[in-house]
Amino acid sequence: MEIKPNRLVYLGYGKYWRSDQIVGLVPIEDERGPGRRTHVHVATLSQPIVASRSEDAIRREMAASSEEEFRVGELRSAFADLLDDLSALSPVLIRMLLNEGSFDVRRWEDRLRALVRPGVEERSGQEELFGSG
């Protein structure tokens, strides 16, 4: 993997770091929660930065070869973050959004999931196959 020098890499929650200064990415497994997905080790700091993005998303952005590929990575990351937030909504709020605002959270989750993880079947197709009817 060739790291593109001097590229700012988004770590989440307004944090950016130069790609050529990142020396290590370690997924957080213990005490992982909102905004705690990866420890990013950088050459100029003694302690790692806590990033809200996955190590794969950060690594892809560090090595993106073209501006277009970089933008696609940014969009995919934003969709993944939005998908995480939508998945965390309470069932009561989901029903309220659907009934009061005609906003179908589950349909948007399926659409975003298809964009973020190509090749994963949408939930609606699975419900038709395995739903009780």
Image (cartoon, rainbow, N blue to C red):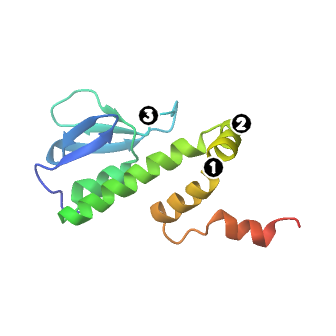
Q: Looking at the image, which is closer to me, 38 or 125?
A: 125
Query: Which comes sooner in the sequence, label 3 or label 1?
Result: 3
Residue 28 location in percent, x, y? 45, 38
Name the quadrant of the C terminus.
bottom right
The residue to which callout 3 is attached is 35
**Around disc 2, counting alpha carbons within 10 Å, would you say few (fewer than 14), some (14 to 19), or many (20 or more)?**
few
Residue at the spot 20% in from the left edge and 40% down from the top edge: 17
Q: For the residue marked with disc 2, what is the amino acid?
A: Val
Residue at the spot 61% in from the left edge and 69% down from the top edge: 121
Q: For the residue marked with disc 3, what is the amino acid?
A: Gly
Q: For the residue marked with disc 1, what is the amino acid?
A: Ser
| Badge 2 element | helix
| Badge 3 element | loop
Residue at the spot 46% in from the left edge and 64% down from the top edge: 115
- Cα separation, mark 3 vs mark 1, equals 29 Å
The residue to which callout 2 is attached is 92
Q: Looking at the image, which is closer to me, 19 or 78?
A: 78
* Mark 2 vs mark 3: in front: 2
**Around disc 1, counting alpha carbons within 10 Å, would you say few (fewer than 14), some (14 to 19), or many (20 or more)?**
few
Residue 85 location in percent, x, y? 52, 41
**Around disc 3, counting alpha carbons within 10 Å, would you say few (fewer than 14), some (14 to 19), or many (20 or more)?**
some
Q: Furthest-top residue in view?
A: 46
- Cα separation, mark 2 vs mark 3, equals 24 Å
Q: Furthest-left residue in view?
A: 6
Q: Looking at the image, which is closer to me, 95 or 25?
A: 95
Query: Which comes sooner in the sequence, label 2 or label 1?
Result: 2
Q: Furthest-right residue in view?
A: 133
Name the quadrant of the N terminus.
bottom left
Q: Is residue 59 above or below residue 42?
A: below
* Mark 2 vs mark 1: in front: 1
Q: Looking at the image, which is closer to me, 1 or 97?
A: 97
